[in-house]
Amino acid sequence: MEASWSSPVSSVGTADPQLQHFVEVETQKQRMHLLVHHMTELCWEKCMDKPGPKLDSRAEVCLVNCVERFIDTSQLILNRLEQIHKGRPFFSESLSD
């Protein structure tokens, strides 16, 4: 006798569109959470030599710069993905000037 079961992965294509959208949104939230957690770890390791009761000015500047670079990089990646999604070359506008 053969077992009759389907894996969740194989049935994704036939799932309710609302359910698919919900799963996609939750997956994106989880990825963002993991990314922020990873970024926090990296900035902490880079900027915090000796944790103390107060944040010294050097550590504060380092943390701000680290987070700002993370935001800049994220924005660049999002813009690049948007350009790919639209089907236009990313640097075509700047090269044609």
Image: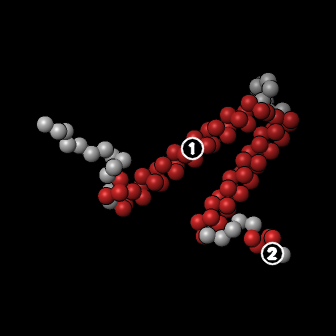
Q: Quadrant of the C terminus?
A: bottom right
Give the quarter of the image for residue 7: top left
Position of 10 compared to 97: left or right?
left
Determine which of the numbered discs, if any, sits on residue 58 in the image. none
Instruction: Give the Cα distance between marks 2 and 1.
Output: 38 Å
Give the quarter of the image for residue 44: top right
Q: Which residue is mark 2?
A: 96
Q: Position of residue 27 (x, y in %)?
A: 48, 49
64 or 22, nearer to the observer: 22
Callout 2: few (<14), some (14-19), or many (20+) C-alpha neighbours within 10 Å? few
26 or 48, nearer to the observer: 26
Q: Position of residue 34 (x, y in %)?
A: 57, 41
Note whether 60 is above or below 91 in the view shown: above
For the residue marked with disc 2, what is the amino acid?
A: Ser
Residue farthest along the left direction in this orientation? 1
For the residue marked with disc 1, what is the amino acid?
A: His
Give the quarter of the image for residue 91: bottom right
Residue 69 makes an appearance in the image:
yes
Residue 19 makes an appearance in the image:
no
Position of 5 compared to 54: left or right?
left
Q: Which residue does the image show at 72% across and 52% down from the upper left?
A: 73
Mark positioned earlier in the residue sequence (2 or 1): 1
Q: Which residue does the image show at 60% across and 70% down from the upper left?
A: 86
Residue farthest along the right direction in this orientation? 58
Callout 1: few (<14), some (14-19), or many (20+) C-alpha neighbours within 10 Å? few
Residue farthest along the front direction in this orientation? 1
23 or 97, nearer to the observer: 97
Label 2 SS: loop
Q: Which residue is mark 1?
A: 33
